[in-house]
Amino acid sequence: MQKPRLYARVTYRKTGLLAFLGHLDVARAFDRAVRRAKLPVAYSQGFSPHALISFASPLPVGVAGEAELCAIELASEWAPQAVLKALARQLPPDLMVVAAQVLPRGKRSPFADLVAADYRVRYRGVTDADLQAAVEGLLARTQWPVHRVTKSRELELDLRPRVGDLRVEPGGLLRMRLGLAEDNLAKPEEVIELLSAELGVAATTQDLTRTALWMRGEVGRQFAD
Amino acid sequence: MGQRTTAFLRRVVTPARYLGQEHNSSRKDPSTVRVRFALCYPDIYEIGMSHLGSHILYATMNERPDTFCERAYHPWDDAVALMRQEGLPLATLETQTPLRELDFVGITLQHELNYTTVLSLLDLAGVTLRSAVRRPAEPLVIGGGPCVYNPEPLAPFFDCFVVGEGEEVIHEVLDLYVGGNWGRTGQRGAEQRADLLARLAEVEGVYVPALGTERPVRRRVLPSLEAVPPPTRPVVPYCQVTHDRGQIEISRGCTRGCRFCQAGMIYRPVRERSVQTLVDAAAALIDNTGYDELSLVSLNCPDYSEVLTLVDRLHEQLAERRVGLGLPSLRTDTFSVELADRIQQVRKTGLTFAPEAGSQRLRDIINKNVTEADLLAASEAAFKAGWHRLKLYFMIGLPGETDDDVLAIGDLVAKVLEVGRETLGPSRGRLALNVSVAVFIPKPHTPFQWAPQLPVAEVLQRQQLLRERFARLKQVRLSCHSAEQALVESYLARAGREAAELTEAVYRAGGRFESWDDRFDLSRWENAAAAAGVDLASEVNREWPPDRPLPWDHIHSGISKAYLWAEWQRALAGELTGDCRLSGCTDCGVRALGAACPSGGR
Ligand code: SF4
């Protein structure tokens, strides 16, 4: 039987040049920030105990995040505001913590309910109108076939039911809401690829950013189960 | 335009090396200072950021309100290609300012095989390579580190070198710079530059090669370490670096007198920090960095007079912070059961023993005063305290070595294995020995500076002997250093100014990162040597006579040539020389530097 655990769930950003940190770099930075902040963090057992800090759905190198999540297991109760304040003093502006909550003691993973993510990407070399037309063209299709290669296998899948929202904003911005749960995952690059077939012109994208992570219940029925 | 654009970062393999913005990095406003100093390491970020000396100098300089010290490392190949393609000069991590706009470009010289990388770094920075033709308005190129004890191979590329410990002399250099009317980089005239260099040459410990080698340059040595507190706010990297931990120097200098060891000569006398200073510094270091491991730095930690007290007191500080403690490279005669028990309490870090030679006869020649019994006792203590994996460090090619001495390494390792099997009992399955075998290289300012370097073919043959010896011992992993790299390192270590031509030719032929064995190519050196009419092997493979002038005769380390020669003769006779801390002063000469010598004098 696992004992109930106490987590501080912290929202942070990985922006600017620090978007180029790898996931392990971010994990190291938090490990050190937590030790500097003297948070009452829980440690693993064994030969070389390490602070129990975990991250939701790692971002690749070069992809920014505006509201990423990190869970710090606490060894004793601390107020969320105190966690936030202590960590904020130890992190640079581009890796800043922006919110913290302390979850009720429980046995579930602090990220078990994570179901969707929002992304934003900027298009270059295409007008807003053409981008809009391409998005409408894609939305008119009932099937979005994607070929995905993972470490262990290759598969064909239909991305359509995994994409919740797709819209264009002035200045070549494309926003998307995509499934994040293991059996409902859609990757932003896959949507960008589908869209480039609709666009027909060679457009480039930059500044891919994850703008939000969503828990079950916070977003529509599409990602509920 | 600096390197740090998204477009640039997107196209390199490890962008985290080029980001800056690390915790504890200096964020001064350049417009508020009077000196801007680029502290450079001629290797990639991950190596340079592991170097304690650089952290010390960075902290020392940035304590001054009138100085902004920034860092630069040699970018990796992908970044170099991009920089060349886009015309981007090497810039500092802190502010992305091109190095060539700063007042000083300081380069730490830790290793001879970095010399071509040094040239590459200057070239990438857009600084003229040869100081003789460097424009007056360009930065001053200044070097420091153990390689400046024979600076001649790099002399034509540097405006000056600082010989010895930098903590005090760097202030004198900076004071001189801000105190005179020399003009800053970009505005300096020819006369101002010449005046400045002439004045710098008057600073004790500063060598200006353009002014010739007549004037002796005396090494700078701090009377005591207590005046220079260890840095407790080092820059904390984001990406994983080679030594990804806090480091604290507990003592400097070693008087054991191993005859091959340059560090054991050029850092004399022994000076220790007090237990209280170290305990306070360790706590501050962890609180300011968040590291989960602290490493004590010294030439031999167990020699620290109050080592058990120190380790006990550190544990009190570190255990509650869940921080592990590491002690690098230990001598086997001083590693005790008590010490083993103490260091394994918090977290086990790697353990390295350095018997250096396999046979007692050879250990006597090199003055490594340890016995087989010492090594076996130390290993037993380590196994009993719970270690399963040990690293053992040896050298081949030592003066007077025969095949029997090499095979004795095999016998000694087999005995350690046996001790491990017996001591570990049921968990012997996890027993592992990493045996690292380096190639001996005669270094300046050591008793072996006159010794011959073993020819490459013989090095290879002795390495083969070892491979065969260990082939069937599964628990032993043997790693041998490259014989060809050793040849070039040996050549550069003792070469004169003529080696500058070769080094530049090798750099032009594509040599850089040559301390990485997969990046080293002997043929580049052979071609350059052939073109210059130099025979690398014949320079290094013979014994040097006592009357041969040494290229570093003008560099006074404080260790007298007479003492070094006498030690060389004692080595050839197989005679031991005691540790002056235990058996009284052996007149190495360091007192002539004016250094109070607490190491004995009885
Ligand atoms: S001067 Fe004498 S006591 Fe001092 S380091 Fe040299 S040999 Fe030892």
Image (cartoon, rainbow, N blue to C red):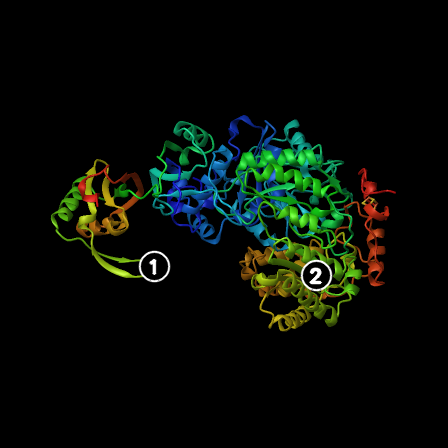
Q: Of residues A9 and B72, which is closer to you in this image?
A: A9
- Disc sitting over residue B81 in the figure: none
The answer to which image quadrant residue A8 occupies is: top left
Residue at x 66% of width, y 42% of height: B311
Residue B246 horizontal side relative to residue B558, left or right: left
- Badge 1 density bin: few <14, some 14–19, many ≥20, Cα 10 Å: few
Residue at x 34% of width, y 41% of height: A110
| Element assignment for label 2 | loop
Q: Which residue is mark 1?
A: A151
Residue at x 74% of width, y 63% of height: B398
Question: How far separated are the C-alphas under marks 1 and 2?
Answer: 46 Å
Nearer the camera: disc 1 or disc 2 = 1
Residue B485 horizontal side relative to residue A193, left or right: right
Please tell me whether residue A146 is drawn above or below residue A45 in the rendered image. Answer: below
| Element assignment for label 1 | loop
Where does the image place residue B286, in percent across and percent down from the top left? 56, 37
Q: Which residue is mark 2?
A: B440
Q: Of residues A217 and B269, which is closer to you in this image?
A: A217
Where does the image place residue A27, in percent across and percent down from the top left? 43, 43
Where does the image place residue B537, in percent across and percent down from the top left? 69, 66
Please tell me whether residue A116 is drawn above or below residue B227 in the rendered image. Answer: below
Can residue B103 be seen by looking at this rendering? no
Which quadrant: the N terminus of chain B?
top left
As shown in the figure, which amino acid type bears the numbered disc 1?
A: Lys
Please tell me whether residue B435 is drawn above or below residue B121 in the rendered image. Answer: below
* Badge 1 vs badge 2, beta-carbon distance below 8 Å: no
Can residue B413 be seen by looking at this rendering? yes
